[in-house]
Image (spheres, rainbow, N blue to C red):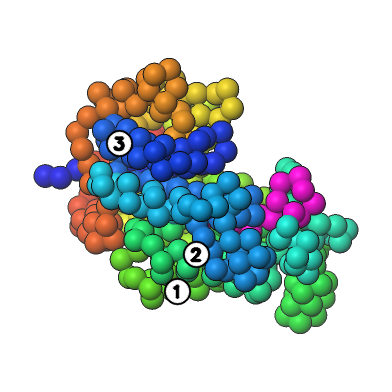
Amino acid sequence: MTTIETRGIWLTTTDSQVLRSKENIAQAMDLLAETGFNVVFPVVWNQGVTLYPSQTMQQYFGVEIDPKSVGRDPLEEVVVEARRVGLKVIPWFEYGFVSSYNLNGGVLLQKKPQWAGRDSNGNLLNKNGFEWLNALDPQVQEFISSLVLEVVKNYDVDGIQGDDRLPAFPSEGGYDQLTLTRYRQEFHRDPPLNPKDRQWLQWRANILTDFWAHLYEQVKAVNSNLLVAIAPNIHDWAFVEYLQDSPTWLNQGIVDIIHPQIYRRDFSSYQTIANKLVTQQFTDTNLSKLAPGILMKLGNYCISPEYLVQAIEYNRQVGIPGEVFFFYEGLRKNNNALAKVLRNGPYAKSASFPTLSDLSRHSESKIKSTSIWQGVARFLKNL
């Protein structure tokens, strides 16, 4: 019987040269296929530019593509090289509703100042150095949707992926005139000055959920087989800090695969959060959609071979059918050491990437039978 698992990796432009030439892309796809991966998530939207020639960006901002990629189409090159070795491709819209990082809004808000997110003091919305577009503004939502839709219409991809910035908005935001007017019309009062008031959080989170539900329908209208993936931060922190209501997304069926970012630097911390996901957020009917994000490399940090293997083995033990690693360069460290660990260990036997029908079949079969993992989950709950 064919093993069906999500074995994914993110391809970045930060701290990586992989997308900077066709040769690098071809080499990367060879390594990933040899290692046992079956899907790549190449960044196509970050730092206010696209990694493909975008008519949407040209029309709105007069910048067709990332300046370092002029004369090329990195997304098309990834698609061609991935197909050559049998990998799926799901473009990743990394920046989501972010405008810039420590650039006071950058080019996007220079051209469209009315699109700025605002905090309760009326200042440009800034969280951890990232400056935000107003994710609650229908015009901004239309712009982001246009980026996503031109990708699914113009490229032979297998889906699209949002993340901790799509759909997302810092909970300190929502104090722009447009959103204030909308809230007043509905409730006949000003919103709370406390940005973390639960009702105010939920009201804004619902706007983002409605946006994503509409985008989900639009993507499916282009091709019903496309997968809609999201890599949010961990619930409920993500809800309180970034208005990401992932339980509602799952309940509404507007996400096909979800990759909560369990970015912890030791296995024990990873295990604690994975347990929580399996026992508290996911059920037998939707566990097949879960493939957590695992931090492989960031700055000087690199996951140990022991932790890498433990995390994958633990995922399977509790019924989690896959994972996605951040990010590709971790495989290359120390003469491809971690790639060799995967190829000779947990990824030694090949696995097929799940299709939509696989996911629904998997859910149905899990409903019909009491799986061993229900027992494991109950045991973990009672510890």
Q: Mark 2 is on which residue type?
A: Val
Q: How many marks?
A: 3
Determine whether label 1 and label 2 are within 8 Å by CB.
yes
* Label drawn at residue 148: 2
* Label drawn at residue 30: 3
Query: Magenta part of the protein: which range?
Result: 92-106
Q: Mark 1 is on which residue type?
A: Gln
Q: Is residue 94 magenta?
A: yes
Report x, y in % for residue 256. Answer: 38, 59
Q: From this viewpoint, which residue is outermost toward the right? A: 121
Where disc 1 sits, the SS reads helix
Look at discs 3 and 1 and give the one toward the viewer.
Answer: 3
Q: What is the CA distance from the residue labelled 1 to the residue labelled 2? A: 10 Å
Q: Is residue 262 above or below residue 100?
A: above
Q: What is the CA distance from the residue labelled 3 to the residue labelled 1? A: 33 Å
Q: Is residue 98 magenta?
A: yes
Q: Residues within 10 Å of mark 3 (few under 14, many from 20)?
A: some
Q: Mark 3 is on which residue type?
A: Asp
Q: Is residue 279 visible?
A: no
Give the mark nearest the N terminus, 1 or 2: 2
Where disc 3 sits, the SS reads helix
**What's the residue at 50%, 23% (across, down)?**
302
**What's the residue at 35%, 52% (across, down)?**
79
Give the side of residue 378 with respect to residue 123, left or right: left
The residue pinned by badge 1 equals 218
Q: Residues within 10 Å of mark 1 (few under 14, many from 20)?
A: some
Look at discs 1 and 2 and give the one toward the viewer.
Answer: 2
Q: Is residue 121 above or below residue 33?
A: below
Give the mark nearest the N terminus, 2 or 3: 3
